[in-house]
Image (spheres, rainbow, N blue to C red):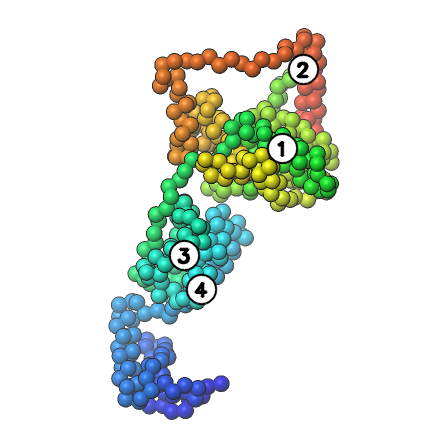
């Protein structure tokens, strides 16, 4: 442990001293009731005294101009900012995107800036970081990604300012240039059918029972996502049986899904999704697999009641096998099912963009920005002056007897579902 071995007082608030473990003199001074210790980096006493005067004068000027701060290392401040965001999320506050901020800070900003003093991060360091980040990405990041990163590091600067570890004028300007938002990777209806068939084959060829269950669940997950537009991830995985409701007449039914967790629910509240009738078979299959379901049970779970994070991997495996992982507009993921839903709805021309934006929990601006390639096709007749009659797919007509039996079966089924909803609180 170092000891003070020599001391020379300059004034009653300023002195220099030597320590047993160093040949350099240090100065110590008081300013507005607080003592500071700084290295003079001088070995000669007279030089150290002169440097002590300069350091003391510099701190007086900084105090008078409100730029006097005790700096901290970037990593330490970033961890404080992360703790604050995690605390807000834990107690129901904060923003959902805080998770993205935390991920960006841990993966990019903390590894790069690390033990650098936060007040020493200037425009040159920001440029070095931008170059390093491109090397990590192996491409220029999307503009939206850079904006997320900027917002994340601004949380760190904000934390430093609040704790008086830096002042606003020391915050560097952040670069927001990047690749503009591009068209979203989606599936055509034909491609979706290919993926669906590929996963059926994978399910049939599964060697382990749990693997088969994951692939079976994935089929329901896909059908639900592509026919509702609900976001794969938090929105889908947060659904419970209590979130599904229905309205039925004799042999027709409309399903509604209440979304309570996800990207926008903190600001928009819960939203109710109107499902396309194609989800009927998916819901019917899930009901059969879980006869003892309770309202609070997760909708997408395995036979033992547990959830799984393997759906994305199983989906990617099928895409790779049939060569549909990559598209001209980027790689496809489970999220591409939502993009497919929006694209198909726009192409049909049956739903206005305003209604679609509300259904999907997004803004009209986002629909126009990311799906502008579809919008002209919505107005083909108006723009071309020609209306092309599309032939309806040929179906073998059902006999009157078969039709009557189907209607009677559905009527009975929907009545049973309605009674179950009243009895157990879910269909």
Label 4 neighbour load within 10 Å: few <14, some 14-19, many 20+: some
Looking at the rendered structure, the secondary structure element under dot 3 is helix
Q: Position of residue 399 (x, y in %)?
A: 67, 8
Query: First in sequence: mark 4 or mark 3?
Result: 4
Residue under label 3, please give it: 132
Residue under label 4, please give it: 114
Q: Determine the CA span between mark 2 and mark 4.
A: 67 Å
Can residue 224 be spotted in the picture? no
Query: First in sequence: mark 3 or mark 1?
Result: 3
Q: Determine the CA span between mark 3 and mark 1.
A: 40 Å
Q: Position of residue 250 (x, y in %)?
A: 64, 17
Q: Determine the CA span between mark 4 and mark 3.
A: 14 Å
Residue under label 2, please give it: 407
* Above or below: residue 380 compared with residue 159: above
Q: Determine the CA span between mark 4 and mark 1.
A: 46 Å
Q: Nearer the viewer, mark 2 or mark 4?
A: 4
Query: First in sequence: mark 2 or mark 1?
Result: 1
Q: Is residue 388 left or right of residue 14?
A: right
* Above or below: residue 185 compared with residue 162: above
Give the numbered dot on residue 198.
1
Q: Nearer the viewer, mark 4 or mark 1?
A: 1
Give the numbered dot on residue 279.
none
């Amino acid at each position: 442990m170092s000891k003070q071995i020599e001391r020379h007082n300059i004034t009653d608030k300023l002195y220099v001293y030597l320590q047993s473990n160093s040949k350099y003199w240090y100065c110590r001074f008081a300013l507005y009731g607080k003592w500071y210790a700084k290295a003079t980096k001088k070995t000669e006493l007279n030089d150290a005294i002169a440097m002590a005067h300069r350091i003391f004068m510099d701190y007086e000027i900084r105090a008078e101009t409100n730029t006097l701060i005790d700096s901290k290392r970037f990593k330490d401040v970033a961890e404080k900012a992360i703790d604050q965001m995690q605390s807000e999320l834990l107690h129901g506050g904060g923003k959902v995107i805080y998770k993205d901020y935390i991920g960006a800070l841990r993966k990019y900003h903390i590894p790069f800036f690390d033990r650098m003093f936060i007040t020493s991060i200037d425009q040159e360091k920001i440029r070095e970081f931008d170059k390093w980040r491109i090397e990590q990405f192996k491409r220029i990041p999307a503009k939206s990604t850079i904006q997320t990163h900027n917002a994340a590091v601004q949380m760190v600067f904000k934390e430093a300012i609040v704790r008086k570890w830096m002042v606003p004028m020391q915050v560097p300007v952040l670069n927001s240039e990047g690749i503009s938002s591009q068209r979203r990777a989606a599936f055509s209806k034909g491609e979706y059918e290919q993926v669906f068939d590929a996963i059926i084959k994978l399910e049939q060829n599964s060697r382990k029972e749990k693997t088969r269950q994951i692939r079976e669940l994935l089929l329901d997950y896909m059908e639900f996502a592509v026919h509702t537009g609900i976001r794969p991830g938090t929105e889908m995985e947060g659904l419970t049986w209590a979130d599904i409701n229905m309205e039925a007449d004799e042999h027709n039914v409309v399903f509604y899904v209440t979304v309570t967790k996800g990207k926008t629910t903190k600001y928009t509240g819960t939203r109710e999704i109107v499902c396309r009738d194609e989800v009927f078979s998916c819901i019917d299959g899930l009901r059969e697999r879980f006869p003892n379901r309770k309202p609070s049970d997760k909708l997408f779970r395995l036979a033992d009641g547990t959830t799984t994070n393997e759906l994305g991997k199983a989906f990617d495996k099928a895409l790779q096998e049939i060569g549909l992982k990559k598209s001209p507009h980027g790689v496809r993921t489970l999220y591409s099912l939502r993009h497919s839903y929006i694209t198909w709805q726009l192409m049909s021309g049956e739903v206005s963009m305003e209604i679609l934006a509300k259904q999907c929990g997004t803004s009209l601006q986002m629909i126009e920005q990311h799906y502008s390639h579809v919008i002209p096709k919505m107005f083909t007749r108006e723009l071309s002056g020609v209306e092309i009659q599309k032939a309806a797919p040929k179906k073998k007509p059902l006999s009157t007897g078969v039709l009557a039996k189907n209607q009677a079966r559905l009527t009975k089924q929907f009545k049973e579902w309605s009674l179950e909803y009243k009895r157990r609180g879910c269909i």
